[in-house]
Each structure stands twice: as C-alpha cells, then as structure tokens.
Amino acid sequence: MAFIKINKQHFYHNLNQIALQTGSVDKIAIVLKDNAYGHGLKTIGKLASEFGVKHAVVRTTKEAREIASFFSTVLVLGDEIIQDEKLSFTINSIEAIDKAEVGARVELKVDTGMHRNGISIDELDDALKGIEQKELKLVGVMTHFRSADELSSELFWQQKRFASVCKKVKKAGFTEVRVHSHNSAAILRTKHFNEDLVRVGIGAYGYNELPSSFDTITLKPVMELWVKRVSTRLLQKGERIGYGGTFTASHAMEVSTYDLGYGDGWFRADTMQPFKTAEGLEILGRVSMDFISLESTKDEVCIVSNAQDAAKQLGTISYEVTTALNPHIQRDVV
Ligand SMILES: *Cc1c(COP(=O)(O)O)cnc(C)c1O
C-alpha cells in the first residue's frame, strides 16, 4: 500500500512562521477540513494541539467530534447548527438562523465579496435580530476573501467592508465576539495583523500559493507520498506497458509495478506528458486503478515530496493534489 510521511518538524516550522505573522500561537485556528487537506484529520489535530494550537476549523460536525478533545474551540463551517458546549457553527445564511437549535454557539459569516456563503451586509440587522430572538450565542464574526492570493485592490475593499460590519456588531451589544477574516494567503501577506484569529489551512501544510512577489516567508511541505514495489520484470525493446500499451520500451529495461493508482486518489493525468516523481522517474504508460509502473527496482519510491511541484505537472494546485489522496492511505509521523 502507498503511504504518506508527515514531517512534524516541517509542520511546526510552518506554524512558527504563521505565529510570527499573527504575533501569537493563540491566534492560530488550524483548518482541518477534508481530512486535514489529505494529511490526516486526527494525526494533524494531535500534532497541532501538541504545538500549542488551541483552535480548529472543520467542515462537518462529524469531523469536529473526532478532534474536539485536542482543542478549546472548534468551528464547523458547513453543517446544521446544533446546541453544543464546545463547538460553534457558521451562519451561512438568514435561513440558517431560523433552522438553528435554540442556544447554539454561532459565528456569523458575512459576505463581503466572495458571493459563496454568508449573509449580505444588507441583512446584518435582520441577522442580529434573529440571533437574539433564537437566543443563539454569537461568539464570532467572520468573512472570507476572494482574492487574497492575487495582486489587486479587492482584498483591501473586502477588509474595509468587514471592518464596518464588525463595528456594527459590537455596537449592537455583541461584545464577546472573536473577529476573523484571514486565510493563509491573507496572513502571509499581511504586515499588521490585528484580528483575534487566523483560519490557516494550506500554509500550515507548507504551501504558499501567492504570486512570487509575496514569497518572503519560507514554508516547508509537510507531506510526502511514497509507494511500495509489488513486482519487477525485464522488458525487451518494443514491449509495451499497461492499458492501451501507451508506453513502449525503447531499450531493454527493468520495470517495477508500484502500489498507487487513481483508486488512491492519484491522478490519471496525461500519458503524453508523463508525471515525473520526486526523484525524476517518469510514470510509464497509463495509471491503473491501483498500480503504476516505474523504471526502478527500489522497494520504496517517493512520488511526491512537494505537492505544489506535483500540481504544476498535473495542471492543478497543491490543495487538490493533497486533498484527493484517499483517507485509507496510511499516514505516519516522522
Ligand atoms: C478552507 C478555508 C480556510 C483556509 O484557507 P487556506 O487558503 O487553506 O488557508 C479559511 N476559511 C474558510 C472559511 C475556509 O473555508
């Protein structure tokens, strides 16, 4: 079975870099949604808590329950709002307030320009009224930036809108709320962080998806993807490998089958542009459901040591490469 190595030192290096940006570890909320971006929900939750991170963000209540014991607060981004002592739930729309369980702890998401989730600024007064009527405990106000990773003035405008929303909320008497808007891209480019929390995902896992002009903070990839050898054969010149026989041996070569395929969340990609592993080996022919072929006899081969480099070859971004990896793959902390 393919396996994933989680580099604890790299993870802690990244958390340290982020803590330098926020001014304190206490302001970090580690985003653990989607199996901690493929790194392993419980593995990363435990490591983060051992580092001193006190807050986590997940997508579902089910995920939250698995890691709640590691943290003082857990924010659920996209699930039904229920009453719970520790978990808080994102209000993504006015309807969500009507459906919420009385007494639930909630964080109000305000749409400042992303236009995916959150109440619009016009709905703010209604939302605050609804929260009071439903006796919900408002513990946070948040927004999400649509262009934090681009060179433009949009981030600036969204920040201005958010600041005025936060002011209104506090003026309405909700003083015990934490304020948070930054994701990785926003915290990596900010110079004067003055909010209560940063929701950091991809940056903690070692990737900076900002244009290179913002590349001042060095992050280190936390994950490595490895495969194990299943069998080896000697191919003669002219023999072909795999479904469709799209790879033809140009010389006699020793080829081994390794245990990774699209069933594990690996990308089938394009046989015309073979994927090159971390060690520079080409994947030969088509990727099968559970197997690939490499010209190697090594028992273990590292396929990816940097998901951003891998993503460039595959025409996507680091998020997709790591998140796609099947949760059943063994994750070991090294
Ligand atoms: C996923 C997510 C984040 C984390 O974003 P990164 O770019 O991975 O740091 C932050 N906030 C919300 C609302 C999210 O959904």
Image (tube, rainbow, N blue to C red):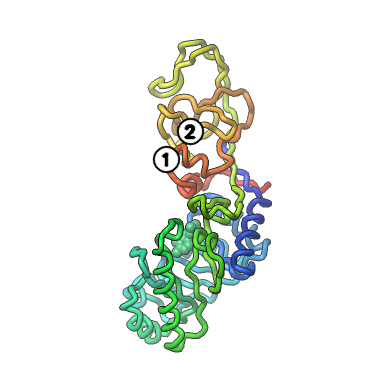
> What residue do we see at 66% from left, 65% from top?
52
| SS at badge 1 | loop
Look at the numbered disc 1 and say if its residue's Cβ is closer than 8 Å to ligand 1: no
Amino acid carrying label 1: it is Gly
Count of numbered badges drawn on the protein: 2
| SS at badge 2 | loop
Marks 2/1 in contact by CB < 8 Å: the verdict is no
> What residue do we see at 60% from left, 52% from top?
219
Query: Is 30 on the left or on the right of 106, as rendered?
Result: right
Q: Is residue 103 visible?
A: no
Query: Is 163 on the left or on the right of 294, as rendered?
Result: left
Q: Closer to the camera, 304 or 46? A: 304
Quadrant of residue 273 within the rendered picture: top left
User: Is the residue marked by circle 2 packed among few (<14), some (14-19), or many (20+) residues within 10 Å?
Assistant: some
Q: Could you tell me residue 256's position as x and y percent?
A: 56, 23
Amino acid carrying label 2: it is Asp
Q: Closer to the camera, 156 or 166? A: 156
Q: Quadrant of the N terminus?
A: top right
- Determine which residue is flagged by label 2: 290
Q: Closer to the camera, 93 or 179? A: 179
Q: Is residue 139 above or below residue 204?
A: below
Q: Earlier in the sequence, mark 2 or mark 1?
A: 2
Q: Could you tell me residue 327's position as x and y percent?
A: 52, 48
Q: Is residue 219 above or below residue 102?
A: above
> What residue do we see at 44% from left, 73% from top?
82
Q: Is residue 290 visible?
A: yes
The answer for how far apart the CA atoms under marks 2 and 1 are is 22 Å
Q: Which mark identifies residue 315?
A: 1
Q: Could you tell me residue 143's position as x and y percent?
A: 43, 69
